[in-house]
Image (tube, rainbow, N blue to C red):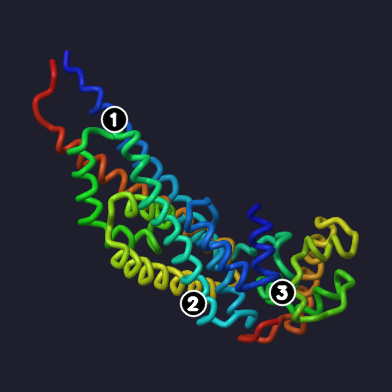
Amino acid sequence: MLDQLLAALTRYGSPALFAVVAIAAVGVPLPVTLLLIITGSLVAQEAMNIWAAIAIAAAGSVAGDQLGFAIGRWGGKALVARFSALLGNAEHINKLEARAKRWGGAGVFLSRWLVTPLGPWINLASGVAGYSWLRFTLWDFLGESLGAALYIWLGRLFSDRVQQVGAILGDSGWAIIGILAAAFFGWKLLARRGPVHA
Amino acid sequence: MVRPRYGTLIVIIGFCLALTAALFFGSRAGRTARRMHWRNEAIRPWMSVPFVAHQHHTRAELLFRAIHVEPNPRDRRPIRDIARDEKVPVSALIHDLEKAIQDSNRAGPEGAAPPGKAP
């Protein structure tokens, strides 16, 4: 699967890039970071133009993100209503929605380029939480443009080491998610400190 | 005896798992970064011949000749497609490319791509 995607990128360039990043943004687990780095290498080989590559990657990602947001907005609400008993009472869900609205912008922006595996989930969550479409699109566009520019530039810089740079960035992304999760659980533990049942 | 609540236990397990994942992926990224300068990239079936030439600082025409394909810098077919077209196994093609790269490295600067230009 990975080989086929990369072969399509090497052979067809921009159309393959657009299709893959759009599909990945909806939630299909595809190695977009590696793809962007290889695109950067193709730029260094003069097989692609850097500005066109950044624009196509950003446009494809934003298109996929919009679909994810729409699924959350129109499909997710019904799902939440159906399984609300599992998620908690209405007050709890309202609290979660309010939190998502409050931190939505930062979450959308950071998940476009720093913690990319969370991106599709943030799209769905933003839609479900009723986050403003305009704000979502703005942060989405800024984050995706930064992400595309950053990874394509890195690929151009390390154009003869794409697989290794891809592996480093992939692992770093998961390490950051691990640190964030550890910080979250640590904070939860501190909040739980208090009377312990004997 | 002090017994933590069930929820607290889940949070502790979550904390330990998250920390383990962060350490595992962080150390793996660090290890790859340290090796990056001296380790060559492996040739993969998705790569085109000009792509392989760029990765190994070799002339693309030299690699095309090594696999008996008419040199064309615009030929962006992946190695596996060339193998299919030429009716040879992908592994044989990769082996020929690796041998050509080794020979080119031994030959010195004549086989190397000009600096700053795509091969």
Label 2: chain letter: A
* Viewer-nearest residue: B115 or A67: A67
Task: Work out which quarter of the rendered image holds the C terminus of chain A and state it.
Answer: top left
Viewer can see residue A178 = yes
Q: Is residue A188 above or below residue B109?
A: above
* Mark 1 residue type: Ala
In what element is the residue under mark 3? helix
| Residue under numbered circle 3 | B53
**Position of residue A48 measured from the top left corner of the image (x, y, whole percent):** 61, 80
**Position of residue A62 measured from the top left corner of the image (x, y, whole percent):** 44, 66
Are discs 2 and 1 both within one chain? yes
* Viewer-nearest residue: B113 or A71: A71
Residue drawn at (32%, 31%), measured in percent from left and top? B13
Are discs 3 and 2 both within one chain? no
Cα separation, mark 3 vs mark 2, equals 27 Å
Is label 3 or label 2 in front?
A: 2
* Viewer-nearest residue: B77 or B91: B77
Residue B99, quarter of picture:
bottom right
Are discs 1 and 3 both within one chain? no
Label 1: chain letter: A
| Residue under numbered circle 2 | A55
In what element is the residue under mark 1? helix
* Mark 2 residue type: Ala
In the picture, measured across the screen, residue B95 lies left or right of residue A27, that is right
Callout 2: few (<14), some (14-19), or many (20+) C-alpha neighbours within 10 Å?
some
| Residue under numbered circle 1 | A85
Q: Residue furthest top?
A: B1
* Mark 3 residue type: Ala
